[in-house]
Image (spheres, rainbow, N blue to C red):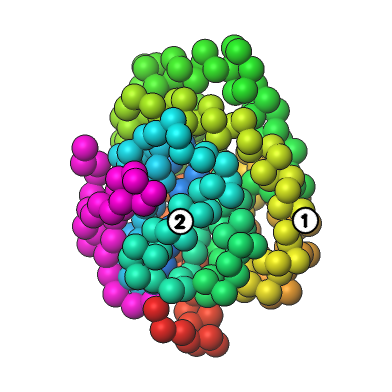
Amino acid sequence: MSGPVFEGMAEHWTTVDGLRLRYLTGGSGAPLLLVHGIAGFSFSWRKNFSHLINQFKVFAPDLPGVGYSERSDKLDASIPGMAKILFRFLDAAQINSAHIVGSSHGGAVVMEMAAQQPNRLRSMVLVAPVNPYAEKYQGRIRFMSSSIGQLFMKLAPWMAIPLQRYAIGRMYGDRDKMPTGTAEGYCKPMRIAGTIPHLLRCFQTWPDDVQNLRSKFARMSNVPTLLIWGEKDGAVELQSGERLRRHFHDAQMVIIPRVGHLPYEEAPEEFNEALIAYLASRQARRPQPA
């Protein structure tokens, strides 16, 4: 099944661990891997592609279990499992090292990648990543893991679009800035069979996976890092980012005013500017072949 494709990008498929994985790619230059959040997919970066492809070869996969990639009840849905999948994706694309961006749950996956194989990350950009110091999201995970929460998850994709807009709008600092078609775009692949069971499996290991990052910070501490946070993030609190930053030897932080948990959607101009400026500085300092 094909999903949405955006100007300058092309849809491709590859096989990773026996699963068909969909991804969008476009542009030229140093490789840049974009890792979406828990219920997102390549659609999450739709407001960023046109700027990024001018300077980078962009890869935006739909992680297995979500978006338009294949589902499997045998998939390791843990954060370490997703990190391994992404390394195999890079192998399939013949990419030795890349700049890697991760949002929310995807940010935790990117940190896990940095702990497993730090030399493969030219730099990492963490967009409000779930992390051991964040507390707000933990209540949501407990709810989603409960029997009532599981029932809610099964019903959620079939809720009316206005309710979908309300739910997604809670991730914004200003819900009026939600781009047209956002709820519809996210909702459609959530209705594909196997999506909700996959997300529930993610929730089972999520708390321990995130807390286990504490013991891995030393392994990722030398990876050049940019943290991007929305000032009004109500999902992963900004204060946790300040504490997280201390674990990296070469880390910068950008706080985007009046913005929530999804700055790449809510304030794409500011996000693109911050991301491109940082990656350009890394390219100048540490040029590496793909």
Can the viewer see residue 104?
no
Which residue corresponds to the image point at 33% horizontal and 38% vertical from the top-left? 70
Magenta stretch encompasses residue 23: yes
Numbered circle sitting on residue 86: 2
- Residue 148 appears left or right of 86: right
Residue 279 picture location, percent across and down: 49, 74
Residue tagged 1: 215
Query: In the figure, 215 relative to 234: above or below?
Result: below
Seen from the viewer's position, the closer of residues 38 and 180 is 38
Residue 275 picture location, percent across and down: 49, 67
| Type of amino acid under label 1 | Ser
Residue 150 picture location, percent across and down: 55, 17
- Residue 59 appears left or right of 129: left
Instruction: Give the magenta-colored segment's residue range.
Output: 1-30
- Distance, label 2 to label 1, CA atoms, is 21 Å
| Type of amino acid under label 2 | Leu
How packed mark 2 is, by other alpha carbons closer than 10 Å (few <14, some 14-19, many 20 or more), is: many
Which residue corresponds to the image point at 25% horizontal and 52% vertical from the top-left? 13
Numbered circle sitting on residue 27: none
